[in-house]
Amino acid sequence: MDKKKTDKVEMKDIANLCRRRGFIFQDSEIYGGIGSVWDYGPLGIELKKNIRDQWWKSMVYDRSDVEGLDAAILMNPEVWKASGHVTSFADLLVDCRECKKRFRIDKIEGRRCPECGGELTEPKSFNLMFKTQMGSVEGQTQDVYLRPETAQGIFVNFENILNTSRRKLPFGVAQIGKAFRNEITTGNFTFRSREFEQMELEFFVKPGEDEKWYDYWVAERMSWYLSLGISKEHLRLREHGKEELAHYAKRCHDIEFLFSMGWSELEGIANRQDYDLKQHTRISGRDLQYFDDITGERYLPYVIEPSGGVDRAVLAFLVDAYRSEVVRERKRVFLSLDRRLAPIKTAVLPLLKNRPEIVEMAHRIRDDIRGNNRVVYDDTAAIGRLYRRQDEIGTPYCVTVDVDSLSDGKVTVRDRDTMEQERVEASRLKGILEKRMGSKT
């Protein structure tokens, strides 16, 4: 079959596909939207769920040294004073006196607006946390914040988890949850959003063993993305220089992905030392030291933190899987997603929707092979168009029921990536698909 690859993927290609096929929509679109906030549609939520499930499986189910947590979004404001977010979680910003646009000072050069050339104001500090009020009586409310990260929920629950799970060091606590940052520099589709979801692990270790575990988690997190199909050429590790390290960090590596706008952070792995537990011990007055009943020592553990964004992972997997080629003088777009991540695993398609026997058989096959995976039935277009639709959303296999299926009991299985077709017995279809999915089901 004559195939020819077309040009590299741009962010606009991904955004158009996501809008057209129901992966991601602009939030509140019918009212004109709201800046850098996004809704995940029927396919987007499936892809997002599959990424979360694979992360949770690798972090919790496949390990014997990690527990899970789901901490609340709203926390006592003292938490954010202890963590330093109230006083230091801010950007220096400048405004253009002419076009009124706002910029982070570290993103511009000189004293002129990069958009219109107008004069810029003096830099002002801008806190990135969203503030709201808690309380039902006006004038008696308390200022609280939407959490800017999920990590602090783990730190303030360190003692609870340690006591209830009876864990010994080293051990970790994993969490997936929403976080909120009033970002000024947004854009590049969902790459930088004001509401986003984090996948974070806080791994508590004995001081002196932190370097060993830091190196371990840098390698482990890089391997996770590769194991789910991201091309090695699109990933790299970049260690932070001393001048860019966060105040709490001893070391930090970014896993970066090659987006159309260049290499950009996908996940960070940091050695946070004992900064957070020390701060919460000081501010709360609660002793959060770990007692080693073998050596008799008491100390605050060091923490290794792999922290990635679900939304950025979704975007990276979409960009990496996007394929565009010309087949028989027609453009074909498909998502070569790992089968574990594909929103729909199999589509069952009747060749003729006006033949009740074919439709009935197709419905029966769909119900038989469904199991724990998302399987759909579709008869809303001609078979060629149905194939293209499923290719574009990343469905690994299409099963076609035709007239001959009624007599020979066989169906056609089509592979998304190769477009190869094979005639198989319908009674063996479930086992055949499970085998082809292999460990990736």
Image (tube, rainbow, N blue to C red):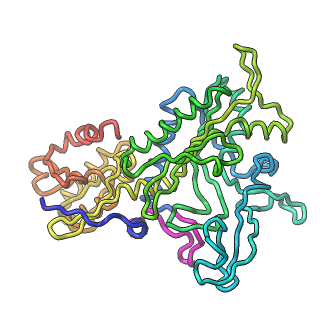
Return the x and y of residue 69 as percentages of the image width and height.
Answer: 63, 39
Return the x and y of residue 8 as percentages of the image width and height.
Answer: 33, 64
- For the residue pair 50 and 256, the one nearer the viewer reads as 256
Of the 4 image quadrants, the one containing the C terminus is: top left
Residue shown at 64%/24% (left/top)?
169
Q: Is residue 36 magenta?
A: yes
Q: Is residue 184 magenta?
A: no
Image-quadrant location for residue 258? bottom left
Q: Is residue 59 left or right of residue 370?
A: right
Q: Is residue 388 left or right of residue 234?
A: left
Residue shown at 66%/42% (left/top)?
249
Q: Is residue 20 left or right of residue 35?
A: left
Spot the residue most to the bottom: 98
Q: How many dots with numbers?
A: 0
Range of residues picked out in magenta: 17-39
- For the residue pair 406 and 320, the one nearer the viewer reads as 320
Residue shown at 62%/63% (left/top)?
194
Of the 4 image quadrants, the one containing the N terminus is: bottom left
Image-quadrant location for residue 23? bottom left
Return the x and y of residue 259 as percentages of the image width and height.
Answer: 44, 60
Q: Is residue 145 left or right of residue 436?
A: right
Residue shown at 20%/39% (left/top)?
428
